[in-house]
Structures are given as structure tokens and as C-alpha cells.
Image (spheres, coloured by chain):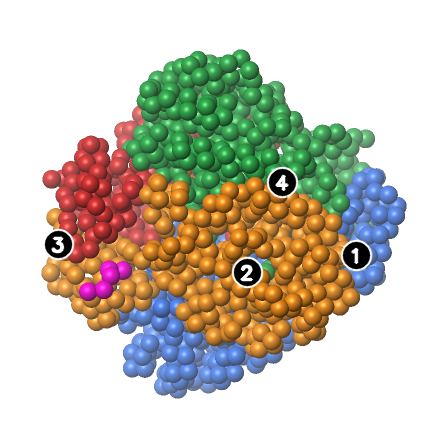
Chain colours: A orange, B green, C red, D blue
Amino acid sequence: MDRVGLILVLEAGLSSPLRNRVRDRLRELGAQVRVVDGGERTYLEVSGQDLAIRTLHPQSWPGVSHVLPLTPPHPHASRRSDSDSERAVPVSVATGSGEAVSVGGDDLVVIGGPCSIEDEGRTIALAHELRDAGCGLFRGGAYKPRTSPYAFQGLEEEGLRILAQVREETGMGVVTEVMDSADLPKVVEIADLLQVGSRNMQNFSLLKRLGSVDKPVLLKRGYASTVEELLLAAEYILSGGNHRVILCERGIRDVAGSSQVILDLGAVPELRLRSHLPILVDPSHGSGAAHRVAPLARAATAVGADGLLIEVHNDPTRALSDGQQALTIEQFRRTMDEIAAIHRALPATARDIASREAETGAFPGIVATPGKD
Amino acid sequence: MDRVGLILVLEAGLSSPLRNRVRDRLRELGAQVRVVDGGERTYLEVSGQDLAIRTLHPQSWPGVSHVLPLTPPHPHASRRSDSDSERAVPVSVATGSGEAVSVGGDDLVVIGGPCSIEDEGRTIALAHELRDAGCGLFRGGAYKPRTSPYAFQGLEEEGLRILAQVREETGMGVVTEVMDSADLPKVVEIADLLQVGSRNMQNFSLLKRLGSVDKPVLLKRGYASTVEELLLAAEYILSGGNHRVILCERGIRDVAGSSQVILDLGAVPELRLRSHLPILVDPSHGSGAAHRVAPLARAATAVGADGLLIEVHNDPTRALSDGQQALTIEQFRRTMDEIAAIHRALPATARDIASREAETGAFPGIVATPGKD
Amino acid sequence: MDRVGLILVLEAGLSSPLRNRVRDRLRELGAQVRVVDGGERTYLEVSGQDLAIRTLHPQSWPGVSHVLPLTPPHPHASRRSDSDSERAVPVSVATGSGEAVSVGGDDLVVIGGPCSIEDEGRTIALAHELRDAGCGLFRGGAYKPRTSPYAFQGLEEEGLRILAQVREETGMGVVTEVMDSADLPKVVEIADLLQVGSRNMQNFSLLKRLGSVDKPVLLKRGYASTVEELLLAAEYILSGGNHRVILCERGIRDVAGSSQVILDLGAVPELRLRSHLPILVDPSHGSGAAHRVAPLARAATAVGADGLLIEVHNDPTRALSDGQQALTIEQFRRTMDEIAAIHRALPATARDIASREAETGAFPGIVATPGKD
Amino acid sequence: MDRVGLILVLEAGLSSPLRNRVRDRLRELGAQVRVVDGGERTYLEVSGQDLAIRTLHPQSWPGVSHVLPLTPPHPHASRRSDSDSERAVPVSVATGSGEAVSVGGDDLVVIGGPCSIEDEGRTIALAHELRDAGCGLFRGGAYKPRTSPYAFQGLEEEGLRILAQVREETGMGVVTEVMDSADLPKVVEIADLLQVGSRNMQNFSLLKRLGSVDKPVLLKRGYASTVEELLLAAEYILSGGNHRVILCERGIRDVAGSSQVILDLGAVPELRLRSHLPILVDPSHGSGAAHRVAPLARAATAVGADGLLIEVHNDPTRALSDGQQALTIEQFRRTMDEIAAIHRALPATARDIASREAETGAFPGIVATPGKD
């Protein structure tokens, strides 16, 4: 028998025919089932096909009282329990200089750039500044998801052309968003790292296509998506054969948040525990306001992220999108100094998972309930 | 005329009698009103009584199109715009040793202790350990707000007695929760710092009584309350005459959070901008799980908090409350080392407000809308 | 052995000593434990003390993989599984006329009145209008929880006096909020139904005192509280000996709601399934705006609520609190006609629980996960 | 000068050059600006280009204190203020019988069918049952957005073929989801009504393409999207030239909801006030559990929706998706009887907007703040 992946606890006093109906339904679906009789309840230990069976909501089947998943629903995205490594498995991103950037290794990787590519001259000038400040990767949107149809929608192909030029002139790697499977071929040609935006985290058609692309993917968490859903979205890409996925926490919605968006930095140790994928944090979208970007960039560094994604603009008050949260170059440089100092002060183990967890015996993936005071 | 605190923008094409009705209603309520005729709209600039008028929802009055508050609704809790200082105004907390602890000054203040006081011997042993690890203040609950009536409800008066002993034997200051105005006299007698828990942040009867008490108050943010509501709760205490209020971010609820609770570290720079009150962070309640406490304690330090509130237990798996999020003493010591290293690495300006904010011209209190990718 | 209330599933491959440690810890806490060996896992079936044990978070104990509660955590608030009745067990509320109002029976009970008692003459005039429109119970706040200390805080004792007069002159029963245990004796003397407001749903000190009072209690759901927490709050009162508790859904917070508050009408069938307590709905607080009150009052009637709580004011634009959501008397009368027509059209079974539930075999209390399109 | 669409309130005491900088920036962007000097503040009344200017976040520009939008950001989706009609403008959907179904007229339109098309025989049998129970439109998913890559992903083209057969054999109109712009041509060929699912509400690439399609679109609200964002998503389609858009409320996420999804029925009167587009409600996804579907279907009818979308399955416990929320045919028939009775009992004005709103002077689109008790 395979490893048990699922346990069904049946209702007390269930009649034999109903009990067998549940068992037979599981077998019909391709699973192996061992029936364990307890004092009061019956337990069905299920192996094989358990990932698919879970998606059928067996807790709503007649006679089933509880359903216990024993393995994570995203095997490719999960840390292997016998893993030697306590850190991320690094993902390599190519650059224009020929030297790849490793995301998830010892260095903190900072990806800087404007929200949208707006203009050739200013974009290239900004890229040079960012490279000199220590960025190996440059971000900029050519295709832009905008809430209003009356907002600037991005330069599209012209934007890609400018990015290609940034790559050539500065030697940086370029990161840009792909919004639709129809645009994928054009974007793949230019980008070193393909960004999936928050609104597309569950665009499953797009995720499936990214599974067969030979470029790394930066997958941003949906603004109202759980960590589990983020890992399941990554699983679409990984199970398709593309192993280079980088996760990104960028803030979620909350009615009571200090702004409409709230950066979930607790997701970083949570993801570290569950997954071997590198984790970036975006303090720009995660704060929504320039005066909070530097403090949250420092916090993201201290919490143990593998890198940051920061919006910078030559003149934020004239930006065609997201100007309210963009840093000036001067502010960006100061932020780089602060996070470098914190990164140096971090103990070597701060990006590990094992130590603390092992001692308290916490089980990866338990749902904690909040305390009271 | 006083300083204008409120502007009402009237609907376009409003008839003269309706217009006068709004103006007269404002005057009846004690306000001074200046009528400004624009090209298309009429603007009523209101001074005096504007704080009370806002609570009447004038945006629902016939003829009123928009209501603009120009001053914060909590004058005592707000940073004065002509303030010289760029930091918190420190709050002093007494201790058993005679030497007060200053919260909001240059030092990072760490308050440690168990969720509940459970037993005399172990409590005092733990307190000695925490003092030796660098804590000047000891926390422990005698009155406990518990979701279930079948949970341990605290030792009550016996718990207060044990806290008094901790104070005497270790020289620490003691912090404990007051849950009800009826218990206030007993708690005031013992505690150096009175804690108002998350579930009581809007217990207005209790807040009013705390306004006339001669002890500092640690006010925890409600688990679904906005930063504005936190400052209004502080205003109840401050306007009653008690100027020693310390704010505490302890996590809020979110359906998509990596746990049911999500620590809103962006609230720290937001509160710093708006208020002169010191700000602590509670990474224990703010994470809900021991393996996330150290990373979030590091992040809270880096974001610029004035201190931390951390739950520690001699034997977390036997704790009568919140054991799942308590650190062992060994884990606590290691966490103290990590946050001390980060605190030292922080630039001197990391707890200021002014620099970054002034440059971008952000207005304190604007509602930022979240970005898109 | 008692009925099993809890099952602990241990981790795979757990050593014998660790396994025994968990079993012994449970016995130490007073529970009976049966050890069931499965093919891969060990199951501990626990009876006795299971309600208290659950509050200790055994899922965080070393070696424990899953914890399954088999009974609801609030036995007094829960529907008995062998219950004959499919409806609420009615709660009787006294009135000034000597004839009690039954909440939870065949009639839809509408409680009307202003948010705050502001003035004697207008209050009594309004009460007469409401009685004539069909209300047997009158609501009005004497003690008011207000977010801002600069808002009208209620007439307090003078308000109670006016309510007593309403009772005498109109023969209605009166409903008013109690905010603090210190005010309880005064409020108990006057009120026929004691209201616990949303912000006090987890004021456990107050709930404990209400357990020994001889008046029915109207318990409003916290604005960010789950249905489970509402039932646990009711359990505090019920287990204290006061069996007359009426629940009230009044809307919860949501970042994406069509207003900041969102009325959770799905809570009505959910509570019906789990509890025998009558359920009211408050479409005034649940909408936050007058133009949505009538539609939501109709919806609450159709969903199967036992009654409604509606704010009415002689002149909403002059109200000292909540004017934006109060109906005029004329609007209220029209709403009463609409809901009466819907109540008559409802099939007799619309407030039952059993029929639909039995057929699909849904288990009360399962956590449903949302669908995808 | 055009109608003023935007007002900028400048900061008090702003220097003349800064003031002119704001004014000139607006003119540069193509707007006309009238400068109004108040007693303390300056007001800039802006006309022309105001929709685009708003998307630039002028509240973050130096010197700007408040930004007041005076017109809705989605002109095509908004009710015209001089509209004669008080109801929806109906949208016509073709069927296999040649007789169109009008959505938004006097009749309540019920769209029934399974979550996924799983099999030809059972699908056609079910369609016949639903047609006989009164459904003119049949729903069924061929392309399925599934959270897990290990879940059933839909029959895709084979599913479309079966839908075409349903159409031909029963004479019903067919409704199915389009997930990706690449699949659009195939789906357009078959479907009478194109469904955009919750996860695709902000798939802007897809929305743009739907703007030039000659089929009506059923646009479901994102599970964490505001009413404003729903109308902006509709605006993408409408401004592209496709005027046949039907909105659908299907529940949003909330941490405290009685299930993970909470049906926002207050959105129906809110959308009615702001938009002329017909509004459906989906009580199946909006409840997540079969025992709540009928009560919420009744509530949606009573609140004034134009129709319902209900999942029905021949054998819910064997469904390959969403079985836990599907009704049996027998349950569906009973639900149809209940909602028909309620629809008949509704007063003629229940789906109008004007009456109540006019009397209280509420302004469409104000943000109401929630009450306190």
C-alpha cells in the first residue's frame, strides 16, 4: 500500500451499507482504502489518488464526518520532509551581462524600476542609476493591468523594445509582467523573468502555459489569496515542467488595515516552512504610499525574505501609474543602505527553517487560531 | 474666525432655501460658517464644533455632496503639525527597582512573560530569567478574556498577588490586563502599566475610567479595528486627562492571511506619522504560532517600533493558554540577541517621521489606494 | 466510557514514549482515552473534559498531527441532535401591557425605535406611531457606544426614565443596551430585553453577569466575529443559568463589501442548523444607509429570520446618532407592509432546518470552501 | 466650460508658485481649471479629462489636500441622472427556441444547471428537467477554473459540443464561462450568454476583447472586489462597444463570515442606485453549502434581484466539482416554488430605485460608515 494521504472519519453509528458506500466510492476513484475500526468511529485510511479525491469535497458525502489531509496538496511546491537543506533552493535569472543573478541564495536580491515603462530616455537613465545603486535586475511594466479603462494602459510592444534596450545598455536582467496567454510569445522573447501579477495569480490558462516555458516566473500572491492558494498556483507551473518559480508577497486586502492593503510579512516564515521556493517581498504595492516603503523594506529584510521588489521613478509626481508609492532615486539609495545594514546584522540562521520549529514540535501547515489579548 | 476644521461641498444647482438650511443647521450646532461661491459648487467652510458635527454624518443631509475633514478627529492623540520632535514623546513606566523604564526613547523596550499567571513558583522563576535576559517589564494575565467559558479564566486576585511578588523580588515593572471597570481599583493598585486588550479597545466605559487613573495605559489595537479607531480609543483616555498612553499593534484578522491573524507592520510608520504616542508590537498574538515569533520580532524592530511584547513560558506545551505561540526561555534569549543586532544596525533616523514624508509631499492621513500588480 | 468528544490523530511513526506522553497528558487533564491503532496512524478517542482540553490547543503538542472536535464547543447554545423541533425554541419578552411577545414563534417580531433616546416628547410620539404600525417592542439607546469621545454619548439615566414612560404609556416592551457591568442594575430595572451591542459581544465580564440576571438578552454579533464566536458568547450567558438568549445578525466588516458593513444573511440558516436560539436581523446597522434598509428587511424576512430590529426617527437628518440609516415613519410603515406580504408568502417550512439538510447529508458545522466561478 | 468632474482642495497657506504648479499640471493634462479662492483654502474646479486625471492619484501631489470626484468613474455603467426609468434596462439573451429571454424586465430569470458539464446523457436529461421546472437558460462549465491542478479541469471543446446539443434539443439558451482570450472564438460560437467568472473579473485583456463581441456578457463580481471595481470592469466591456452586460453578485470573502464566502445582498440596492445594468445573484457560490441555497435564493428574490443562477446536479455527491453546494432536482423544484411565491408578493416598486432614496436625500455613491451597536 502507498503512503496514506487522506483519512476519512465516518459518522458515529453509521450503518454498514452506508459505510461500504463511502469505501466503495473511494475505490472506484482509484484509491486504496484500509478500514480501521475504533471504539466509536470508523477511520478510512486512503492512499493513491488522494490529491484528486480531496478536490471532490468528500466532507459533504453522506456519512462522512471529517476529512483529514495528511500531505500538502501541492507536492512540487512543498519542501520535502527529508530535505537536507533548510533554505530556499535558488532560482537563477539571466541578465544582459551574461552573469546570472541567483534568487534564494546568500545575497539579498533587489529588483528596482518604475511601475510602467513610459518613455525611452528616462527609463534608460533610471536603469543606469539603479544598476549603480546595486540592482542586478530591472523591473518595468509594458502591459499594465489597470482598474479603470481610462487609465494609462502601458506602451505594450514599444515598452518591450525599451526593456530590451535597457538590458543591452546596462547589462541588467529585465523583469516584466505578462497579462494574457496571447502576449506570452512576445514577452518571453525579451524578459529574463516573467512576472505574473496579483490579479492573474489564478488565471489558470496562463499558468498552464507558463509550465512549458523556458524562463523563470515571478508569481505574485493574489491580493485576497491565501498562502495555500499561492502554492497551488505555483503547482500549476511546476507540475507543467517549469521548475523555476519565485514567490512574491505583495500585500493583501483588509478592511481594518492601516491602508487598504496590508503587507503579510508573517507569510515569509510560513512559506519558508512549507516550500523550497525563493520568496520576495514587494513593499511598494504592500504599502501603497511612499512614506511606508523604506520601513517595510527594512522589515521584509529582517523577516528573512530572499529579496525585494521596489518601485522607483525619476519624478514620482509625474508618473503615469503608481506615483504615490514610487521612491525617488535618492530615497531608493538611502533605503538600499538601510537594508544592507540589516542584512549584515542578521544571524546566519535567520533564513533557515528548522531550528525553532523542531523544538516546539509545531506541525507545518497547522491552522493556528489567534490569541485573545 | 477659528481655524477651519471642516468643509461641506454642496450639490450643484441647489436652491437657495436648501442651501441656507444647511448653513443654518451648522450655525445652530454652534459652528461659524463662511460661504464660498465657486463656479459650479458652493463650499461651506466650517470652524468651531467641527469634531462634534462630523459625528452627525452631514454627508447624509439633503443638499450636501461631500464632507471634507481638515483636521484629525483626535486632537490629543495627533502629532502637532508645528512639533519640533520627529519621534514619539516617551512614556515613563515605574518598576519595582525604583528606576522607571522609558517607552518611546532611544532604547528598544521588550516586555516578556507568560500569557496567564498560572502558578507562583514558575512565574517567579521565569521573571528572574527574563530580567537577566534584559527585560525591564514583566507581563502576565490575572484576568483573562477567553472565547470559551470552558477555558481557564485566570487566577484573578491571586494572580495580582503573584505579580506584586514578581515586582518585589525582581525589581521589574509589571504589566497586566484590566477587563472590566469593576476590577479597575484592584488592578491599579498592583500594575505599573495597565493593559487594555484587543477585545476591549472599544469598551468605552472602561476607556473613560482610564482617563482619570494615574497609571500609564497600554492600549492594544482591536483585532478588526482601523488605525483611526485605535487613535480615537486613545483619545477617550487622553481627553480624560491621562496623558500616558502607549499604542500596541497585535495583528488583525484577514480571511487570506497566512494565519487567521496578520501583523500589520505598516501601521507603525502610519501611526508614527499621525501620532506622538509610543508604539509597541506584539509578534506573539500577531503570529499565532511560535515558529513565526522570532522573524516577526525582527521585522517589528526593523520597521521602527519602540518595543515588543513577547509571550514566554517555562513549558509552552503545558501552558493553560496560548501555549502554541509562547517561546521557551532559550528561544527568547536567541530572539533578544537577534533584535539587539538589528536595533544597532538601524540608522538613527529610522524612528523619525519627517525626512521621507516631506520630500514626497504626502499628506498625513490620506487614504492610499492599492496598486495593481 | 462517556461519549467521545475529541479525536487526536498522532503523527506517523511516532515513538512509543512520545505517544504515551500525549495519552498521559490527556488523562492527567481528567479525560478518558481509548487508543486505536490504524494501519499508519494512531487515533486517541477522548471523552470527558474535551471542551476544556480543546482550549489548550493540543494541535501544537509534540506528536499530534490533527485534532478533531466531534461535538460543538457550546453545548447549551447547540441544537440537540435528538430534538423533535425543527425551529427555534421561543423566548418570551414582557411588555408594559402585560401581554408577552414571543420571539421565535410563528409571528415575525419587529422591534422599532430610534438609535438614541434624545428627547422625551418626540420619543413618546414616535413610540405611539410604531405601536400603531404593529411593533410590540420599542428600542432606544440610553447608554451609547460611540467611536468618538466628541459624539453624543446618550442621556444615560434620563434615557432610562423616558423608556420607562414609553413602556407605561404605550404598553410596549422596551429594549435597550447595557454597556458596562456597573450600569447593569439600573438597566435591568427598566428594560424588558437587555441588548448587548456588537462591540461588547466579547465583553466576557459583562456576559458572565448576564448569566445570573432574570431578563432575556438580545446578543448582537460582533462586527468581525464568526458564528462560532457568537454561539460561544451566548454560551457564557446560558451556562450561567439565564436561558433566554436571542441572537442578532447585524452585519460584519469587509474590505470589499458594497458598504463598509455587509449583512451576512447566510448566517441565519447556519445558526438555525446549529442552534435552537431565536435569530433576529438588524438591517439598519447591517446596511449603514437608509436606501438599503427596506430591501434588506425584505431579504431578512425571506431568509427565515424570527424578527427584525429597525431604526426609525421622527426626523432622520436631525438625529444625534445614526441619522443616515434611520427610516422616517412613513418609510417604516411601507417597509412593514412589504415584509408582511413576504412573510405570508413564505412556505410553512421556511424556518425549519431539517428537510433540505437531511437529504444532502450535510453535517452541521462543516467548513465549506467557496466555489470558483 | 464643460461640467466640473473633479475638485482639488489645496493645502492651507500654499505658496503661489506651488499653487500654480498644480493648476498648470492639470492644464498640461488637457483639463480646464477654474480657481476659486475661499477664506482659507483654494479650490480648483476641473473639467475635461477628469476620468484620466483621477487615475494619476493627484492626492499625492505636493500641495493637494483633498480630491473630490463629482461624477462616477464609469460613465457607461452608470445610471444617467436624468433617466426616466427607475429600473434596469433589460438585456436580451437568445435561446435555441428562437424566443429571447429578457433579463432585467418584470420576470425573475432563473439560470440553472450543473457546475461542470461532465457527461452527455446526464446533462441533457437534467436540462429537460430544468426547462420543465421553468428555466429558460441553462448553465454548465466546459472550461473550469480550478484552484488545484489535480482537480477536474472541464471537458473543454467536448463540453461546448454537449451544450450545443442541449440548446438544440431543449430550446433553452446556454450560458458558459470563457476563461481565456484564446478560447473566446470557440465559446462565442456556441454560447448565448458568455460568463466571466469571479477570478477573471479583472482579466483586463479578456474584458477588452469582450467589448467587441456580439453576445451578451454575464460578469461575476470578483470574490474580493468592490462594487466600484465591478462597475469599472463592466466599463471595459461597455466602452468597447458591447452594451449587453449583466452583473452578478456571487459572494465575497470574509474572515468572519458564516462560511468562507458571504453573499453581499446589500450590493443589489447599491448597484440598482448606481447602474442601469441588470443584476443577478448566485446563491450557490454565495453560500458554498446546499442547505443555505434555498434560503439565500428567497432572500435574493426579496431584495430585488433580476434573477438567479443556481447549481443543480442529478446526483450531487458524485459531482466532479462543487457537489457540496448543488441542489438535487427535487430541491430545485421546491426552491422555484418558494421564490415564485415571494416574487408575486413583492410590491411593484421593489425593483425601483427612486422613491426611498429621494426622500432622504441620500447621494448615490456616498460611502456610508457603519453604525455602532
Q: Dot 3 corresponds to which residue?
A: A37
Q: Dot 4 falls on which chain? A: B
**Tag 4: amino acid:** Glu
Q: Secondary structure at mark 1?
A: strand
CA distance separating discs 2 and 4 = 34 Å
Q: CA distance from mark 1 to mark 4?
A: 30 Å
Whole-number angstrom distance, CA of label 2 to CA of label 3: 52 Å
Give the label on residue B270, or none.
4
The answer, for residue A362, to whether it is visible in the render is: yes
Q: Nearer the viewer, residue B122 or A203?
A: B122
In the rendered image, the quadrant that contains the C terminus of chain C is bottom left
Tell me the tag on residue D46: 1
Residue tagged by mark 2?
A: A102
- Packing grade of label 4 (10 A; few <14, some 14-19, many >=20) is many
Residue C147 seen in the current view: no
* Residue C282 percent location from the top left of the image: 45, 44
